[in-house]
Amino acid sequence: MTRTVDIAPLEEALTFAQTKAQDGERLIAVRTYQEGQIRGVDLSSLCASASEDAIDLIHRLGQDAIRAFVQAAKDEVEVSSDHLGLPIRLGDQNIGVGTNYAEHAAESTVVGSPFLFPKIVQPTAWDAPIPAGDALLDFEVELCLVPLEALMPGSPVFGGLILGNDVTDRAVLLRNVDVTDPQSGKGFTSGKSGPNYMPVGDLFVVPRNLPSFLSRLTLQLSVNGQVRQHAAATDWIWDLEEIVRQCRLKRDVRWTYWGGEARLAFGEAADIPARTVIMAGTPAGTVFHGVPTKDRLMGALAWLLSGCKGPLIAKVIERYIKSARAAKTYLQPGDRVDIRVDRLGCLSNHIVAAL
């Protein structure tokens, strides 16, 4: 995939990239992104230390001062996008939203409102490999909000934006989900928190006007060059304000997670901490489209032949997993998942057998 991305004008947003440590870390205010090359202003001279990232710099100097520095700069640097790493520091306490796009809910055969779940995994770079192992590995392009400061009750929802791929092991998810109440989010943390299951984009974008900026974004994901997901970002059911409101309603909820418990990221003062990745859900086009009737019938037959031992739904799910593995329906080693969104950046992740 040739990586060319429209970059928002400076008066509309600040767009940041960070080069990889092995290439000499540099924080760059991106002006153009053409054919795999970014051009922009090196902000290293503004940084108080080598570890300071875009969010640190905004806290210390403010957006207006950074914007003025970029406007006044006479020299630009050019860097291959292959040399970009994580654009900001992020933690492993992330917040996900299930079935927040109506067409995805329909294809997944989930009836009801969107729902929340914790995703406990350290984000990786835009080009990080994703291990398949024995998973039914699925993809999900997601717009992600990253608060620059803690989101306190009553404060406006604002922050920077980054792209994400909410990678999922459908086998683990289905074996742990509550099929009578998928809105509980049970099973989602376990199915979505494997290692390298959260690559994020190569750019971090801080808009002046978040609602206006969001209205121009179109999410797109391709597998091996074939478009699989394509939708306006704001086709969602819950917008970012509602997602944050729902998070506060669920702050005391615990989700089962690999035999333990997980909860949404919250500070002591009912705030959502800065740098929390809030994933806004995925549009239609994922691999999972519900359990087919054939697998339901064959699973039911296997249950009857076993003398009705164990839960019927478990037999159906195991039949589906077996069929999907045999058909290689899900992502396989050698596949490549590409995400490209104008104004937000790119991901390109190869599927590997194991890390």
Image: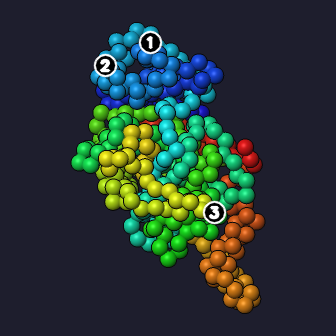
x 59%, y 18%: residue: 24
Q: Position of residue 114 (x, y in %)?
A: 41, 63
Total count of labels: 3
Is residue 10 visible in this depiction of the protein?
A: no
Kindly report the distance in space between the C-alpha atoms of the residues bearing marks 3 and 2.
48 Å
On residue 65, the disc is: 2
Residue 42 versus residue 253: which sits nearer the camera? Answer: 253
Query: For residue 171, what is the image quadrant?
Result: bottom right
Residue where numbered disc 1 is placed: 45
Secondary element under disc 1, as helix, strand or loop, is: helix
Identify the amino acid type marked 3. Val
Q: Position of residue 74 (x, y in %)?
A: 40, 9
Q: Position of residue 36 (x, y in %)?
A: 57, 28
Residue where numbered disc 3 is placed: 172
Q: Earlier in the sequence, mark 3 or mark 2?
A: 2
Identify the amino acid type marked 2. Ala
The residue positioned farthest toward the front in the image shown: 268
Is residue 49 visible in this depiction of the protein?
A: yes
x 68%, y 89%: residue: 308
Position of 153 compared to 102: left or right? left
